Image (spheres, rainbow, N blue to C red):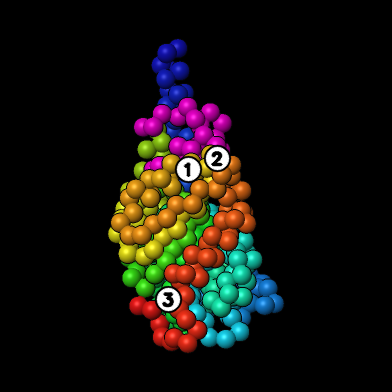
Amino acid sequence: MLAIALSLALLAAGRVRVAGAWAIVKAPNYGRAEVAMMEAPADVSRAIRAEVGPPSALLEAWVFDPDGPARGTTLLLHGIRDDKRALVGFGRTLRDAGMRAVLVDLRGHGGSSGRFLTYGVRESRDLSQLLDQLEILGLVEGPVSVFGASYGGAVGIQLAAIDSRIRAVVSSSTFASLRDVVPPQAAHHVPAGAWLPSAVLDWIVDDAGELGGFSPDAADTRVAIARTHARVLLLHGEEDRVVPFENARALQRACAAQCSLVPIPGADHAEALASPAAGRAALRFLERHGTQPASAGGIAR
């Protein structure tokens, strides 16, 4: 009987590992050979697609252009398993403030192709290639900045670590590393997930990396924030249980550049992302560090 029980326990553990690994890295557009372009709002200036990789993917982006010359160019990055439609409101706010807002579907999301999520490892390289193509199209004016929500915030910080064109990053409610965020995610989304041993969670993360073809330890936003020279604003809800507030503290401690942390009192993960106060803080920061005087020209490099 003991042997049977042990076999069943090992079988259950194996299934947990497989299911957990797939849950971590399977992109919303996994298995779709072709991804149709999304219908853009009427006030989007243009919709573009850019080829990136390896592995090859097409990224879709919507551009909101200001009435006059852009004082800066901001990439807007959505959260995990979301898409650029969630950022249309803030994109319009930036446009009205004189900035060009480029709303991007990260690989595997929305109108972008791709099979796996890599928590910033590939996505940051994708965006550097996207910036190259935006420059060729004449769509980069003034300093380049990033606004990222949750998953997108980690991608933005990792982008700033590898691309010196990024002058400023606003990161809202993001994680310190993939390994740091898996335990609270398991506790939040999986029955009895809070009781899974840390060794099992590490195995699941390792399996996820093998599936997605990347090193999970490279998805470390703390390492990235220590490497960037961009100014960084961290916004985070103090009552966040999905990505606990300690992630923001860890990022602030690791930051080698000029980083500010603005706690959102009483806010959980979703409330912090939707907070009007956080939105105002992000706008003030981008106007200060992500723009240049309207009379100045050229591309920030």
Name the residue type under label 2: Glu
The crowding category of the residue bearing disc 1, from other C-alpha atoms within 10 Å (few below 14, some 14 to 19, many at least 20), is many
Instruction: Please name the residue shown 47% across and 70% down the image.
Output: 288
Q: Which quadrant is home to the N terminus? A: top left
| Residue 96 shows in this picture | yes
Would residue 294 appear left or right of 179 to someone viewing this image?
right
Q: Secondary structure at mark 3?
A: loop
Q: Are marks 1 and 2 in contact (CB under 8 Å)?
A: yes
Residue 186 covered by magenta stretch: yes
Magenta segment's dominant SS is helix
* Secondary structure of the residue carrying numbered label 1: loop
Q: Is residue 201 magenta?
A: no
Residue 213, by quadrant, is bottom left
Tell which of 197 and 184 is nearer to you.
184
**Relative to 8, does residue 204 appear above or below in the rendering?**
below
At x 56%, y 78%, the residue is: 98
Q: Give the magenta part as a residue range.
A: 178-199
Q: How far apart in space, not on screen, are marks 3 and 2 (Cα)?
A: 33 Å
Q: How many marks?
A: 3
The numbered mark, 3 or 2, whose residue comes first in the sequence reads 3
The answer to the question of whether label 3 and label 2 lie on touching residues, with beta carbons closer than 8 A, is: no
Q: Residues within 10 Å of mark 3 (few under 14, many from 20)?
A: many
Label 1 – label 2 distance at C-alpha:
7 Å
**Which residue is located at x 38 percent, y 50 percent?**
252
Name the spot of residue 47 as percent of width and height, x first.
58, 77
Q: Which residue is mark 2?
A: 239
Where does label 1 land, which residue? Answer: 245
Residue 26: give x, y in percent of width and height. Answer: 50, 51
Task: Tell me the amino acid under the disc marked 1.
Answer: Phe
Instruction: Identify the residue position indicated by label 3 in the image.
Output: 143
